[in-house]
Amino acid sequence: MQQVQGSSGGSKNTLLWILVIGAVLVVIGIFCAFLGGVAMYWMIVRVEDGEIVEHYDTSTTATTVPAQPPTDTKPKLGTIKGSVGYPSDFLPSMEVCAEDVNTGDYLDCAVIIGNGHEDFAGLDYTLKVPPGSYYVFAIITEEGDPNKMDVAYYTEFVKCGMYATCTSHQNVIVIVAENQVLTGINPVDWYE
């Protein structure tokens, strides 16, 4: 019987030790969680190309907080739309291009396949360009007189309505912003 009593007394002591150790572990766990949370603020980061992209701030919340907003190095494009025409009874094949005012580079060109006869309604073009300033022009791509380069720009003459009273043939600078869609940019001043 002593063994049973001793066992029963030992069970109480073991239970007491388990509770004490459990309480100590809980206190240590809380302490570690506090220290771990502070340490995670400094330790858990994601780095791309030598830059901190995001980190976990566990001192206030458990969600991801971006350290820097992601930068999109590619500019969002703008759109230039219009129609082509030609002062003749046919429409030759041509390209419509956007020429950067500052560099002279052609940033986008649309190919227009001429149909060789009068029925050329609906020959529209669309150019996608980065934000900037452009001259828009059409150029004949069919073989012709090698001494003559047929080019038509979008000019003040076109904006004026192409009437006899419209005297300026100055190229219009088309300014395009990100995601902007410009319409009615018709490079049809073949008369300059």
Image (cartoon, helix red, strand yellow):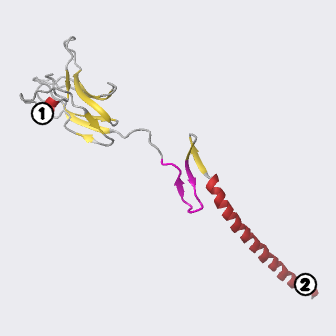
Give the label on residue 160, or none: 1
Q: Quadrant of residue 94 in the image?
A: top left
Q: Quadrant of residue 129 in the image?
A: top left
Residue 148 forms part of the magenta stretch: no
Q: Residues within 10 Å of mark 2 (few under 14, many from 20)?
A: few
Report the amino acid beneath label 2.
Answer: Gly
Residue 122 position in % (x across, y down): 17, 35
Report the amino acid beneath label 1.
Answer: Cys
For the C terminus, give its image quadrant: top left
The residue at the far bottom in this view is: 1
Residue 90 position in % (x across, y down): 13, 23
The number of numbered badges drawn on the structure is 2
Name the residue: 28% across, 31% down: 134
- Tell me if residue 73 comes above or below residue 150 in the rendering: below
Residue 2 position in % (x across, y down): 93, 87
The residue at the far right in this view is: 2
- Tell me if residue 123 comes above or below residue 16 in the rendering: above
Given contact means CB atoms under 8 Å apart, are the residues at marks 2 and 1 in contact?
no
Name the residue: 33% across, 41% down: 178
- Span shown in magenta: 53-69
Q: What residue does disc 2 label?
A: 6
Q: Residues within 10 Å of mark 1 (few under 14, many from 20)?
A: some
At mark 1, the secondary structure is: helix
Name the residue: 13% across, 22% down: 191
- Position of residue 107 in the picture relative to residue 114 (left or right): right
Q: Nearer the viewer, residue 108 or 166?
A: 166
